[in-house]
Each structure stands twice: as structure tokens, then as C-alpha cells.
Amino acid sequence: MKIPQDKIDEIRSSADIADVISNYVPLRKRGKNYIGLCPFHSEKTPSFTVNSNLQIYKCFGCSAGGNVFTFLMEYKNLSFIESVQEIAEQYGIKIEYEEEAFNKQQDEIEELYDINLVAAKYFSENLFKKSEGESARNYLEKRRLKVQTQKIFGLGYALDSWDSFLNLAKSKSIDLDKAKQIGLIDVNSTGGYYDKFRSRIIFPIFSPNGRVIAFGGRIFKEGEQGAKYLNSPESKVYHKRSALYGLYHAKESIREFDKAILVEGYMDLISLYQNGVKNVVASSGTSLTDEQVKLLGRFTKNIYVLFDADAAGQKAAVRSIEILLKENFEVKVITLPEGEDPDSFINNYGKDEFAEKVKNAASFFEYQVEQLRKAGKLDNVNDQTEAIREIVKNVALVKDVLRRTLLIKSLANKFGLREKLIESELEKIVSPKSERIIKPSLIEAEKQVVTIDEVKRIPELEREIIKLLFEGDSEILGLILDEVHDDDFTVEGFKILSSMIRSEFAGNKNVTTSYLIEKIENPKLKDFVEKLLLEDDPISKKMWEEYTNEIVLRNNKIIFAQDVVRRFHILTIDKTIHTIQNELNAEKDQSVITELLQELDALIKEKASLRNQHENS
Ligand SMILES: [Zn+2]
């Protein structure tokens, strides 16, 4: 089922983003924007911004952002198509679908999701309906997982076979190369395909919106060979570093309680969930990454770390804590009795005992002192100094100055030390001497025709041009794209953006802001553009003031755009002049000097002409 692209464009441009969002989030008008409390992270002062002209939203707290479709996808856990359908319904637009074969999906990513979905259903049927699934059913029963829980988490079973998924894939004419891309099948040395997951319990991994992005397969039979866990490889739909197991199931509860519990494994998480503790996510074996922590930070900044009581678990806990502190999380540590893991503990002691453990969780810092005490590191003065350094190292990770000060106070109390002493230890870590940046000497250059201050403004003007491009005015787009080439930009990311807009514009697409935003693939660039468009940009203001007399009075944005481009060209010429001047200073060969001078002369003339146009515009 496919919705034609022009229909999607029509639906996108019919919706008013402020209307749609205000169904879910109270908004009030401020300046040219609407603001409200962000639904994607917990906050007390509004940083969630919606702009009706550009039809986009952006949260300056957690960076969530996008257009009307993105909002529904994130807020209501819808797929792209579902969110298009929802808006269409709301605005009474009738959709005519184009029928299509499975392997001609809307785009490649959608196709990969669909293949994963087929696989997830297949694994699930093996587990619940096939006689071969009995051993897996028995195993999960032994692990005290209820059937209902197994279904909630979409658990499945990969048959003990080399080709049963492969045959299913063929029968559904699934693109085998794509199934290989997402690690469901692989190729052997003779070029034949085979099933990657065999004789394993399958844990589907979901995106925060509930789409199947990958699988984890666990061996469970006595004496079975191979790695305990087999995971899907990195792919276009599965970015290991930013996937957090269980977030889809936990997010409502995390928002509700404004805290999350972090465990290590799938089974820990599922057991806790079954016992009513639902605000849990799992780092699933690997150590926690910055990306995972940033993602979680959109839901809460309070985290309880709960790792196995064994040495490996505790080591992993300490590593995770460091990353969490860097992202300004309030970190607590839950400690279980020796020999217990979260799964065994909740099953042996129940929910209330567990709640008690959460209540008594130590701050990361108390926890660390306790660990050092256990290791005997607080017994004599020498070791103690070492121990303090160890702890201060973590305090230094906390970016928030106020929180850091409070931590220093309590550290001082705990050890009976002067705060100054700890501060000076901290100082050594926070500002190492090597941080001074040496600026290239430009004194000589500054004496020349072109001052470096002007050249330094190139990135500012480039930002201004990018901003104009994304405002989606086709006349301005045409004008800028004619005059500025992708390679003219000095900032690498701007080249990418400019080239993307160029190809969208060439395809005669409906190049509105909200359409263009959807097309940015790189999340960092997308974040940048959204902020650029919605923030009260001091650079724009400065530019406007510079042109106030002519431009604002005429109230003509086109002239403004033309002039920005002209200024950009002038500065680009300045940059070249600058380079030539430096070459001239170093050059000894008279014939080269003559050539350079001619080039310089031509550039100065070109610049003068542009400047003239600029002044008369
Ligand atoms: Zn937010």
C-alpha cells in the first residue's frame, strides 16, 4: 500500500502544525512562535517551540524536532504512513492508495522495517504455535515468564534449521540482499544463503516508536555451542549505539514517574516489567553509550543504575555512571545482595522488596565511597588521597556548576576535608594547562586591504544563506541556487544541505520548510537547521539592522536575499585575496609575482563592482 508523493505533499501543506500539536500540548503565543512544555522530556519552563509559518517544531531542551508528521510519529508512536493517514482524516482529505508488490516499498528504510516485521511474526509463530517450539516454551516457563509477557515483548523462537526463514522470505518474494543487510540471513562460501538465527530464543528490539529494528537471539539448550547472544548487525534501521532495549515499553512509565531504571539484560528488564516495574531500560550487554544516554534524557534525567552484583556488573555500572554524569543525569545506584541479579531478585523477593531497594538507592557518590571502603582504600591516609582523586574525577564530569558545588560540599563532609582542597583537585582535572588555543598569527595580513574580521564572517553569511534556503520561498531558492554553488560553502555540512535542497528543487518538489526538514538524513544537521530556523538568531538581527534603511523600508526579502548572496561573494573574494597576499609575501620568483598581482587586480575589480551593486541595492 503506497500513498502517492503528491498526496503526501498535499496533506502536509493542509495541516496547521500549531492546530495539530495543540490537541496534545497546551501552547501559547510568544512573538512569531508558539511555546509550551515539551511532551518529549520533563521540564518546568517551556522550551518547546512551534512555528506556524515554517510548519515545524523544535524543543531547545531535548532537541526533539520536525514537522507535523514527525510530531505524531513521536508523540503517538505512529509510523510515517500512519501519521499521514491521521492528518488526512483530521483534515478530511481522501487518500487513494497505489497497490504495490512487497518489494517496491515507499523507500528502502520502510522495506527493511517490513522485512523485520515479517521475521518477527515468523519467530513468534514458531514459539507459540509450532510443535518445534516446545523446548523454547518450556525454557521460558522455567524462567517464570508468563505467556502474556512473552507476547508483550514479541518474543519468538528461531527453528533449529538452516533455511526455514530463507524459504519463507523466498515465498514472500522478499529481497534477499536486503534480508542479508539486516542480518536475518547470510551467504556461505559457495554463495548460498542460510538462516543466521538458529535454535535461539528471539528478543525483537524495538525503536522508541515501536518498530522492529533488530533481533537478539539467545541460546538456551543444554550443551548448545556458540555465543550466548547473537545480535543483528548495524544497519540502516538499527544503530546499535543509539538503541535502548525496552524504551518503547517503558517510556510512558518513565515519563509518569520521571525516573528510569537501567539494567543490563533483556531478561532482567522483562522480569521487572512482568512484576509491575515498568520504567526500565536495558543497555543489553554492551556498555552504555553517549547516544543512548541522550535518547533517554528526552524522557527523564533521573536514573537508577541496577547491575548484577558480580564484579563485571559493578564495573559496567561505574562506566555507565560516568557517561550519565556527563549528560547531567541525577544518578542513583541500586545494590542487590551478593549472588542476585534483577531477574532472580524480583522473582525471589517480589515487587515490594524491590521498591524498598529503589527507595534506599545510594547516590552515585555514596556508592563509590562504599565501593572504596569495601576495597579497603579508606583505611590509611595515603590510600585515602588516591580515593578522593578517584571520586573527584567523577565529580568533574558533572557539567552543572551548582550541582558540582553541592557534591564538593558533601564530599568534604564525608571525608572531613576542606572544600578548597577538593576544589583544587577538581581544578586540575577540569582545566588542564594544555587547553590554551594558539591562534594563527594574522597581524601581517590585517595590515593589507582585507581585514581578517571580514573573512571571519563567511560562516555567518553561510548560515544566513542556509536559513534563507530552508525558509522555502521558491523565488529566493531559485535566486540563491543560481548564484551560490554547493562547493562555495566553506562549512562541510552546508555543502551537504545545499546540494540536498538543489536536487529537491530541481525535482520541482514542493519545497516548503516542513518538506525539506523531512529530507535531512543526518540528525546533527537536522537539529542544526531546526534550531537555526526557530531560534531568535542574533546574526539575522544584526544583518537586518545593517540593511535596515533600504531593506526593511521596502520590506523586500528578495532584495535582502540578493544582498546576502552578494556579501557572501564579496567575502569569498576577500578570502582569495587574502590567500594571494600571503603567497605574494612568500614568493621570490618575479614572474609568479607578476601573475599573482594580475590575479589580485582582477579580484579587486570584481569586488569593487559587487560592492557598488551592494551599495546601490
Ligand atoms: Zn524537549
Image: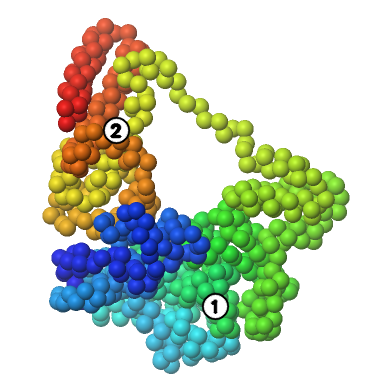
**Circle 1: residue type:** Lys
Q: Residue at x 34, y 53 (%)?
A: 31
Q: Quadrant of residue 443?
A: top left
From the top left corner, tell me how far across and down residue 452 is, in percent: 37, 24
Q: Secondary structure at mark 1?
A: loop
Q: Counting residues from the N terminus, which is met first, the one under dot 2 or under dot 1?
A: 1
Q: Name above or below for residue 101 compared with residue 564.
A: below
From the top left corner, tell me how far across and down residue 390 is, in percent: 71, 49
Is 43 on the left or on the right of 467, as rendered? right
Is 394 on the left or on the right of 487, as rendered? right
Q: Which color mode does the image show?
A: rainbow
Q: Name above or below for residue 426 compared with residue 322.
A: above
User: Which label sits in the foreground, 2 or 1?
Assistant: 2
Q: Secondary structure at mark 2?
A: helix
The residue tagged 1 is: 278
Q: Quadrant of residue 49?
A: bottom left
Q: Residue at x 57, y 69 (%)?
A: 259
Seen from the viewer's position, the closer of residues 28 and 22 is 28
The residue tagged 2 is: 546
